[in-house]
Image (tube, rainbow, N blue to C red):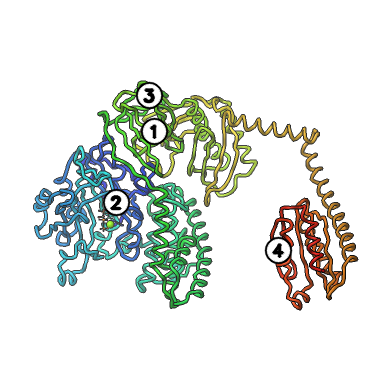
Amino acid sequence: MDAKSIRRTFLEFFQSKQHAIVPSAPLVIKNDPTLMFTNAGMNQFKDYFLGNKAAEDARVADTQKCLRVSGKHNDLEEVGIDTYHHTMFEMLGNWSFGDYFKKEAIEWGWELLTEVYKLPKDRLYVTVFEGDEGDGTELDQEAIDIWKGLIDEDRIIPANKKDNFWEMGETGPCGPCSEIHIDLRNDEERAKVDGLGLVNEDHPLVVEIWNLVFMQFNRKADGSLVSLPNKHIDTGMGFERLCMAIQQKESNYDTDVFQPMIQFLAAKSGKEYGKDEKIDIAIRVISDHIRAISFAIADGQLPSNNKAGYVIRRILRRAVRYGYTFLDFNKPFMYELVDILSDQFEETFPEVISQKDFIKKVVMQEEAAFLRTLDKGLAILQKAMDAASDKTIVGKEAFTLYDTFGFPLDLTQLIASENGFSVDTAGFDVAMQEQKDRARAASASEKGDWIDVNDGDSVEFLGYDALESDASILRYREVTEKKKTIIQLVLDQTPFYAESGGQVGDKGILVSGEETIAIFDTKKENDLIIHFANKLPSNPSAPVVAKVDASRRSLTENNHSATHLLHAALQEVLGDHVAQKGSLVNEKHLRFDFSHFQKVETEEIEKIEKIVNQRIRQNIQLNEQRNVPIEDAKAMGATALFGEKYGDFVRVITFDSDYSVELCGGTHVPATGKIGLFKITAESSVAAGVRRIEAITADAAEEYVDEQITLLQEIKELLKAKDPKKAVADLVEAKAALSKEVETLRNKELQAVKNELASKAVAKDGFNFIAAKVSVANAQGLKQLAYDLKAVVENMFLILAADVDGKPQVAVMIDEELVKAKDLHAGKIVKELAKEIKGGGGGQPFFATAGGKDINGLDAVVEKAQELLA
Ligand code: ATP
Ligand code: MG
């Protein structure tokens, strides 16, 4: 069975058991501070488990893109070294939200594996949770009893909390689980060693394929477990591992999921896969990593220098260095794999094919950039080796390579060992720890548990229709960040818009009796709307009135609607390839990032601005449609964003159905005329293939234009000219001519001074001594004067006390031969003389200068100099 049929069969099987098939959530998580990337199928359903939200379907199945490279689940170090852990993988899953529980989950799982996929029963083992004293949980006898009806009892293995109690993160939904493992060794090996003892022992051919989690607890911040309101089923099966099992392979990479890429890499590098372990690992790593990178980019996460973006960049660099070191690729190569990938996922994850060119561009530029620092890093590494005393590279140096040049420690170690060196890894760890401590100190944030105040589950957003409403506080918690404690509040209903889709969260007030509490921000966490305040009302259970800062909201709306008009204008002027890559909309301005491969030219900017302003003047009425079935919205041609998670029902914002139709949850103007005026203030590049436009609207735009006009007016007045452009051009020309003239005059003057000084030289003790006070235009002039004198006066000993454009300076110059013969040092002399002008300085033995603060001391300098001579 090929991979596509295996995936389809899974979904059809659960469809036949009344499961709704839902799309994968994006790989990159936007509204959850506890998680950067989706790491399990259940992430998108977290709120259902916690009871924050009611599930639309009680039974659901899907294939979910997962990434396990950070946080609680991090498999990065294994990837490619072993044959069954990936960075990005598909997790096939079926769920019950308070519907069926252990019996159906176990029986259906078994039916699918053994009867539909026909995996041999004598190769399968199952584990069950043995209980944990610390948590106060017990042996899962219920699961054992169900399994007994399906599989030999000696194939049921009790296992501990580490393996059989599933947790998404440090806090959140969790529960005991039961895993299904398969023994893929050949018969000979199986006869020699019983598979039973190899389960959960990291054997590459005795691996876990499916985990059935029985969600029944919530892990709180203090580490304790509380029961969830309902019991749920959450299962996750590694798609690539399932393919290996069904296709009877010994490695995920031998399945048709990876083979096309493996073959490509082998052919391109001219190396054979399966001959040399080092080369094999490199090929596996690359064919794995390109998947994580491509899907992350498709979901809107570009490689960058922090957070999720840095994770992606690191993965990319790891792959590039494997290619560089083991496959001799010294030019970008990974981007070529994107073609293969996008074809492969055309049916399941079309986001890769529709953004193929963009992904390729980003990957190629990232590769090229790292290949540049790779060289530099290698040079630095060479220097570190040259400087190493005992054939050990200093840990700090290795850390610099890691931190500044993106060199993973293992690359530094590898190159070092090729040259007979080793790396002080303890020192590296110390430097790393220091950096981590700094980072932790900077971002330390502590969240208390939610404290329930009033009953109620649902949270209703009223802010599309109202800016003020009655409400009651459902719950609150304290959050401490950077030593400051704030209160986060959840209301049963609220007009406050929570930051999302680029639009900032509302500010405003809560009125509770006599008391007024300022709300300084509103954010989303999953689907909760969280209000940020500095204090809690004295009676939190009393009713409140929630009021949004209306004028700020109104200005923000202008900018949000303008963003839609801009998006459509960009597509009209630049082309259909323009896709939104990010945006920020607040009361002051708007920022819009989009895919486009070159600078937006001035004429294009003008065109875009013109279109938007025309649309504004047409005063197009807002057409806001809520709860539109997603399919209908797509049929309307609505622009959706990649990497954004949309439900089955969406909100559609239209400004003229032939112009701008977007899926959007933000707030908008009732008609475009309210925007007033739109002005682009900047155009720039933010990343490979991504441009940014910044703009302002309404009052801000008017002010901006007024300022520009005033400025021009003032310039005209200053110039006293009707044609300021010509006047400025004339001025520039005149200034250049004047500068030239001044220069000539200065030179002449300097020549005259020089001649005079030269004629006054006094011969004594083999020197021709000159000490004088002079006045020059700048420091360069003083130096010039000294050197000019040197050219005409032999055996010179020169001391100049200079007024340099109002500031005192001293210069001392002594003939080089005499410096040597008489062991003199101009630097020392100038230091002594500079005391008279309250300054200091130094220089070479034959020439030195000093600056000072007291211009009145110049005469004293000359006097002191005369004393030197006496
Ligand atoms: P393992 O112990 O093998 O790392 P796990 O206990 O971390 O697995 P779960 O968190 O239970 O795995 O995830 C459910 C399923 O997802 C696993 O049974 C496995 O088939 C698959 N899976 C987990 N991690 C990976 C990975 N890094 N790459 C590919 N598949 C994976
Ligand atoms: Mg794991």
The residue at label 2 has a CB less than 8 Å from ligand 1? yes
Identity of the residue furthest to the top in this view: 513
For the C terminus, give its image quadrant: bottom right
For the N terminus, give its image quadrant: bottom left
- The answer to whether residue 752 is left or right of residue 279 is right
Query: Reading the chain from its start, which is encountered first: label 2 or label 4?
Result: 2
Q: Are marks 3 and 2 in contact (CB under 8 Å)?
A: no
Which element carries disc 4, helix, strand or loop? helix
Disc sitting over residue 831 in the figure: 4
Disc 3 residue type? Glu
Q: Nearer the viewer, residue 608 or 452?
A: 452
State the CA–CA distance, disc 2 to disc 1.
39 Å
| Neighbours of disc 1 within 10 Å: few (<14), some (14-19), many (20+) | many
Disc sitting over residue 751 in the figure: none
Q: Are marks 3 and 4 in contact (CB under 8 Å)?
A: no
Query: Reading the chain from its start, which is encountered first: label 1 or label 3?
Result: 3
Which element carries disc 1, helix, strand or loop? strand
Residue 376 appears in the rendering: yes
State the CA–CA distance, disc 3 to disc 2.
50 Å
Q: Residue 385 at x, y = what percent?
A: 49, 74
Closer to viewer: mark 2 or mark 1? 1
As drawn, 374 above or below 212: below
Judging by the rendered image, the residue that carries numbered circle 3 is 515
Q: Nearer the viewer, residue 187 or 284?
A: 284
Q: Are marks 4 and 1 in contact (CB under 8 Å)?
A: no
Disc sitting over residue 533 in the figure: 1
Disc sitting over residue 91 in the figure: 2
As drawn, 848 above or below 45: below
Disc 2 residue type? Met
Disc 4 residue type? Lys
